[in-house]
Amino acid sequence: MTSTYFTEKLLGWYPLHRRDLPWRATRDPYIIWLSEIILQQTRVAQGLPYFHAFVSRFPRVQDLAAAPEEDILRTWQGLGYYSRARNLHACARQIVQERGGKFPENYESLLQLKGVGPYTAAAIASFAYQEPVAVVDGNVYRVLARFFGISTDIASHAGKKEFQVLANQLIPGEHPDQYNQAIMEFGALQCTPSNPDCPNCPLSSGCLAWNRNLVSSLPLKEKKTKVRSRFFTYHHIQVEGHVVIHKRTESDIWQGLVDFPLEEFTSLEQILSPRPENLSVLRELASLGPVFEQGTQQPWKHLLSHQKIYASFVNITIPEDQQVKLEKWAQKNGYQLVDRQRLEELGKPKLIVRYLNQKK
């Protein structure tokens, strides 16, 4: 009775409260897949402009597969978690090269795609192909944990398995797409992480968390991400409308994006008052007669999911007659000298974009 009550209440609530979102008006697996990848770890309001940009620029999976990686990263710029963009590109190529541009049509086959995990596979399978397999994301964890009073840690292996089993037991054979959309929307709009409107909730009479005063303590997530601090000094090197850039190819944050020549230090004090003699890049450029200008005394801060970046910027202007030597130095050190238009076209970390916008 409880399961039937839960499902029927959700399906009754959804048509009255659903947001009008473009990916809900199609069964095209490409559009659904694109929206799901963009919305991972991203709020709808933030992800919507990116969704429109991708659909406009890459209307078919073939267009996405054929695009250079730098175009993908530039379109993704500012959304964060750039491995999603690289996996998006790799998956598009996999679909075109191995499957003739056609998406798999069931959950198990969708799991074989690059960057597609259980949640995304379930979303595509149910929304595009009406397969009754349940999606389990943060919203679903919260709704199920509260309504059924489940205190198992959602970050644990046992918790993930328990919630997935329960979710698959609840999903109806008819209209599984509507149910999946309903429970996610309910978590996003009604059963919110903080201050949910429990007195006016259609599920409140059967909700164990509400009736036992456990709403604020569920779902339980004990594993916390350890955040480490890093301290960067960037060298913004310019000569006659050109700038030296560094493409990040190492296995580190922002892989595939471009920033500036960088020196990393171990403390905040080292980046706040940089002395020219302590900066190896400046020492190497000394023969070119650069003009050194110390950046702001306040660090630029950028918070990632697992890292807190503190950055200072050193502005370096090279005389026009030394441009050829600067270009040789850049090539020798794995950098590039590009004009400002080219810099604008390339994908950059949000930290660099903020800095450049402030310089305008």
Image (spheres, grey):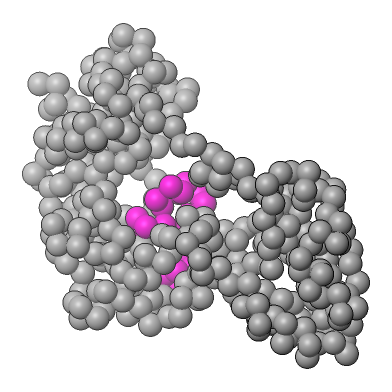
Q: What is the magenta range? A: 35-56
In the rendered image, residue 238, in percent from the top left (x then y), is placed at 80, 76
Q: Quadrant of the C terminus?
A: bottom right
Residue 75 appears in the rendering: no
Q: Nearer the viewer, residue 11 or 78?
A: 78
In the rendered image, residue 225, in percent from the top left (x then y), is placed at: 46, 37
Query: Where in the figure is residue 46, as x and y percent of width and height?
Result: 52, 51
Question: Residue shown at 67%/74% (left/top)?
Answer: 245
Q: Is residue 173 visible?
A: yes
**Image quadrant where residue 66 sits:** bottom left
Q: Is 225 placed left or right of 238 in the picture? A: left
Residue 20 percent location from the top left of the image: 39, 50
Closer to the camera in the image, 20 or 296: 296
- Is 181 on the left or on the right of 330, as rendered? left
Q: Is residue 159 left or right of residue 86?
A: left
Q: Residue at (50%, 49%) from the top-left corner?
A: 45
Q: Residue at x 37, y 66 (%)?
A: 88
Figure quadrant of residue 24: bottom left
Residue in the picture at 19% in, 77% down: 99
Q: Is residue 35 above or below residue 144?
A: below
Q: Is residue 70 left or right of residue 134?
A: right
- The image quarter containing residue 315 is bottom right
- As for residue 52 lying within the magenta part, the answer is yes
Does the segment drawn in magenta span residue 118? Answer: no
Farthest top residue? 212
